[in-house]
Image (spheres, rainbow, N blue to C red):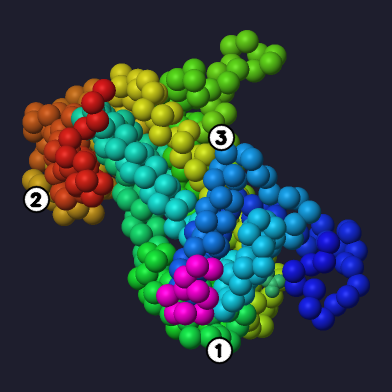
Amino acid sequence: MRKLWAGRTSGATDKTADDFQSSISFDARMYRQDLTGSMAHAAMLAATGIISADEAKTITLGLEGILADLENGALTPDPAAEDIHMFVEEVLTERIGTVGKKLHTARSRNDQVTLDLKLYLRDTLGGIREQLRALLGTLSDLGEEYAATIMPGYTHLQRAQPVTFGHHLMAYAMMFLRDDSRLSDCLARMDESPIGCCALAGTTFPTDRQLEAQILSFSRVTKNSLDGVSDRDYCLEALSCLSLIMMHLSRLSEELVLWSSWEFGFVTLSDAYTTGSSIMPQKKNSDMAELIRGKCGRVYGDLMALLTTMKGLPLAYNKDMQEDKESIFDALDTVVNCLSVMTPMLATMTVHEATMHRAAETGFINATDLADYLTACGMPFRDAYRAVGELVRTCIAEGKTLTDLPLEKYREVSPLFEEDLYDAITLEACVDRRTSEGGTSPASVLSQVAYVREKIGQTTGNEK
Ligand code: ARG
């Protein structure tokens, strides 16, 4: 078949070369966006008198028919077509005749492809934002439920100070909240219609780009046609946002893997989200969490791939840019899949509060509070720090915890110690007293939960 773009050329392209340059195997997924864009284009061409109202009507009906047939499976994208844009135009012209050839007036595939991709991202990122909200809802529910559940807080993966499990989970909620706001920023910046930039220089036809943008629900149009067709910043920005989401999911996954190990025993993941071993009957592996952690790498890879593709391209469109879609689609699919596993995996895990508490009882994680006690009695903090260090050394030598150590031993180090020191260093006291804004006290955790729920437009917890 003669190519739609066979203007100057007369010889056929090599079959291998044809397959090599075809993008329909992956860009067919943008068919809805392509048809939506074409319908808007036909409407604009008619509104400006570039084509007649009758012609626009015939084109629109044809496009609607193609959309319906693609949706119900009566029509499938032809793998021999070059891309989804060519495929739609070819089918349209086959179905409605010569008038179909008028649709491509005052546009080019260069502005068409970037329009489709923006529309596709807008739809899919909107879905990811919904998924993030669901995850934030689950984290808030868990944050509320475990607002007073004590666990060791770590730095350097060494027991550091007691925190609550609710506080730990709400830390992730803050990350995902930022991810959501980053997506919102990214969507706001990409909210510019590129259609009408045409091949690179604009057009001689009296088009109305504002009208076409309006039909497609864009707030603005791109201001420079060379930039409009060659810009992929919005893809890179989206990939950066997706990379950060994956990094957060990966860190959380790592914690789930650790927490569900025998060594920690803080949580048990539901059987629905674990696997067994083909040889070791006792095994329950946290494969889903591990896979989420593993898939983070491919999304970073998608970002690096497109950054590298773009770095040396002269203006305006270059075929290299066809590589944008596989990176984008892979990253979007990965994030969608990971979020759809993470949220129910968290919602269904069993939390072992007693084990968490036991872990917090050893490791001298109340030592800071003991130093604070001395400081409150008037000793400068640095001296208090040293005194408590000495007490910890004594405890280690005698196989005791700070709670078991008798008052005489305390007094040998400082006469400021009184019997009430023991109340000051219970894990509950350590946690309850950290009421500073954003701190780990149950009251503070509950206000973090309220903050997140307000941000996601949810006033109370989900019904269980
Ligand atoms: N399939 C192409 C892409 O994804 C569409 C744009 C082609 N434009 C061109 N001038 N060859 O980038």
Q: 353 or 279: which is nearer to us?
A: 279
Question: Which-is-in-front pick, marks 1 and 3?
Answer: 1
Crowd tier of the residue under label 2, counting other residues whose Cα lies within 10 Å: few below 14, some 14–19, many 20 or above: few
Tell me if I can see residue 6 in this picture: yes
**Left or right of residue 429, residue 361 in this image:** right
- Frontmost of labels 3 and 2 is 3
Instruction: Give the CA distance from mark 1 to mark 2.
Output: 82 Å
Q: Is residue 344 left or right of residue 87?
A: left
* Front: mark 1 or 2: 1
Q: Which residue is mark 3?
A: 290
| Mark 3 crowd level (few <14, some 14–19, many ≥20, 10 Å Cα) | some
- Residue at 23% x, 26% y is 463
The residue under label 2 is: 378
Element marked by disc 1: loop
Amino acid type indicated by mark 1: Thr
Disc 3 or 2, which lies upstream in sequence? 3
Point out the tag, 1 or 3, that comes first from the N-terminus.
1
**Does 257 sit above or below residue 36?**
above
**Pick the front one: 2 or 292:** 2
Residue 279: x and y, percent? 70, 14
- Residues at marks 3 and 2, CA–CA distance in whole angstroms: 49 Å
Which residue corresponds to mark 1?
A: 204
- Distance from Cα at disc 1 to Cα at disc 3: 56 Å
Classify residue 403 as left or right of residue 287: left
Q: What element does badge 3 sit on?
A: helix
**What secondary structure is found at the residue carrying circle 2?**
loop
Q: Quadrant of residue 69?
A: top right
The answer to which image quadrant residue 369 occupies is top left
Q: Residues within 10 Å of mark 1 (few under 14, many from 20)?
A: few
Q: Is residue 343 magenta?
A: no
Q: Quadrant of the C terminus?
A: top left
**Span shown in magenta:** 46-55
